[in-house]
Structures are given as C-alpha cells and as structure tokens.
Amino acid sequence: MGADADRVQLCLSLVAYAGAAGESARRASALHRSLAGWLAELPVTQDHEIVWGPASFRLWWQPSAPALVVFVTRSRRPDDDACYVVIRGGAPLCVCDPSVESLGWFEQEPWVWARNPGDLAPAVCSGIHRQLDVIRELTVDEQLPGAGRSLAEFLAASVNALDGDRKLPVHVVGHGLGGALATVVALWLRDTQGSGASRDVGWDPARHAKLHCMAFAGPTAGNGDFAIYISERLGAQLELIHNSLDHAAALWDTQTLVGLADLYRPHVVEPTVIRVVIEALGEELERHGVEYEQPPARVLPGQLNTQLPPSYAAQAAYQHLHAYVELLGLAGQIDVDAILGLCSGTDDGPVAQ
C-alpha cells in the first residue's frame, strides 16, 4: 500500500490508545467520545467515523490497567469504502514492565483455525490466544454503533449489504501488542472466511471481503510454523512495519532478544538490570521449550534521539511510539503524548490544527 495508507493506519493504531484513564476507561460512551474526538482532530483521519464499537475488556483484578479495545471505522470519502478494524492491546509494550510475564509468552496454544496447514504446527502465545477469544466474543454496548453485535456479526452484515459482486476491503490494524493482536485477528478472519470454515461459522461464505493487515511495532505472536502459515495465508496482504531501533519488534525471538541490551549504544550504556532482564527472558523461554519467529517485515531505518536523557527506558519509549510518527512523515500532525494523557512535547508540539 502507499505512504498515505501507512499514515492513516498508523494514526488509527495510535488513536486507539486514547481514553485509557479517567471516565473513558470506565464508560463505553465516554471512550467513544474520546476516540471520535481524536479521529476528528487528526488531519489524516478526520473523515473517519466509528461504525462499530468501541468494545472493550479489562481483567477484574487489574482495574487500573488499560483495557483491550476494538472498534471499526469507515471513511466518509467516496473513494474509500473500506472498514478499518482497530485494536488496542492495552498499554504500550515495554520489556522492563513487571507485568510482562502475565501476557503468557512462556506458553503457546495451537492455532486451532488452521486450514490445510500440511506439516506445519502453527502455535501462538497463550496470552494472545486468550485475548483473541475475548475479541471473538466482544459485543458493543447499547447506544453505540453496532450495539449488540460481535465483530464477526458486524462484518457479516456489512458484506451482506454489498450490491452484486462488489468487494469490501477490511483492514485490521494495531500498534505494539495491538499490532500482534491485529495479525491473529486478520488470520482468524481469513481462516473463518468462505464455506467450510472450521470451529466458527464462516462470516463471509462468498468471500466478498478483501482482508488486509497492517501492524506496527508488534512482537511476534507465534512460533516459526505460525510465521510461515500466516505468511502463506495472507501473503502480500500482511504488512508488518518495524522501526529498526524498536525493542518490541525483537520480542520474543531468543535470537533477536540478545541484541536488545546494546540497541541504543553509544547514546545509552545500558544499566546492568536491563541485560539481566533480557537474559532472564531468553533463558525462561528456552526453559519452557517455546520459540518465536517474526514473519517478514518492512523495517524502517530508525535513528537515536540524542535529545533525550541517556536512559534505556526513555529511548525505548521514544523508538516504540514517537519514532514511527517521524519515520512516516507525520511530525507535527499527531501528538502521541497527548493521546496517552502524558505531558506533551515529544512529537514537535501539539496536534496540528
């Protein structure tokens, strides 16, 4: 896809982080207002409106944690009739986050929707698998667009409303953990599309939807066989976009983990704790006998931000979030810190009006 499509889908993925605290984190209607407000504020998404959702889920024992959020937008432009399925996986991902183990990376589940996998045994992270199960069952609250419908039901109705042989482009997008979830949601939709779908009832038996996934800054969701399988099933419609200096894209392949401690030299000399954490993660993955591998990705040439303090955490946060804005030519158009509810200023000032 072109650069404009990249920018639109990055902005949608970052807007998904809005409303993670306060009233928006407690009430779906307030979250809808927050998301819709940001969509209208940004030049590249101001023509988008939410047509399903948002639907969200939060573990009851983590009431302060940012929720899993899914919503669908459509553009009001006559030349763009696509649906955009946007996924937030929680908070932006950090390798030093003490809750990282709760994401279930040390266990894997078979990809049960596989169609004709041959000798492959695709498997995904247990936490990703659980979150996909949640997404499959989520329905939208009353008073919101698509009320009472699941994502599959909404997409099925959208396909059924098409005239004749028209096709419906469906883009599944996300950033960070949301990016990893975007890949598995897109694959789940692909594997349950058409007649004879296993497990779930096919939502698009005549294959009128054209599926596409664009995922930014995401860790790999599954093992080597999963990387092969998803690449075969989605082909050129799977677009993974990584900043070369983003630590998240190196998770959880033990071969790429080893380079993380030195990723930001010479500006950052890592504290011993960073190397210890990374080595412990690699050893734990090997002890559990699980392996991960990224499908082929488009890697953007990142640059160290030497204006930041020489801190691993500061550089990692910048490279995981703000650098994508710079690399895709959106500087001055989107303020990531403001979306996250932080002090503004990292992304060349406030959102351009």
Image (tube, grey):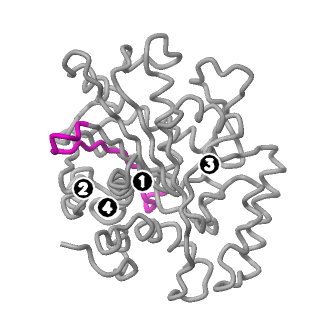
Secondary structure beneath label 2 = loop
Q: Amino acid at mark 2?
A: Thr
Q: Mark 3 vs mark 4: which is more N-terminal?
A: 4
Tell me if 132 is positioned left or right of 251 in this view: left
Report the label total: 4
Return the residue at label 4: 19
Q: Residue furthest front?
A: 2
Which mark is nearer the camera, 2 or 4?
A: 2
Q: Which mark is residue 45?
A: 2
Q: Amino acid at mark 4?
A: Gly
Q: Residues within 10 Å of mark 4 (few under 14, many from 20)?
A: many
Distance from label 3 to label 2 (Cα)? 27 Å
Tell me if 225 is positioned left or right of 328 in this view: right
In-front residue for pair 144/26: 144
Secondary structure beneath label 3 = loop
Q: Amino acid at mark 3?
A: Thr
Tell me if 91 is positioned left or right of 127 in this view: left
Q: Residue at x 65, y 77 (%)?
A: 264
Return the residue at label 3: 220
Q: Which residues are magenta?
A: 62-81
In-front residue for pair 343/206: 206
Secondary structure beneath label 1 = loop
What is the x, y in percent for residue 271? Answer: 72, 82
Which mark is nearer the camera, 3 or 2?
A: 2
Q: Amino acid at mark 1?
A: Ala
Secondary structure beneath label 4 = loop
What is the x, y in percent for residue 344? Answer: 34, 80
Q: Residues within 10 Å of mark 1 (few under 14, many from 20)?
A: many
Which mark is nearer the camera, 3 or 1?
A: 3
Return the residue at label 1: 67
Marks 1 and 4 close (CB-CB < 8 Å): no
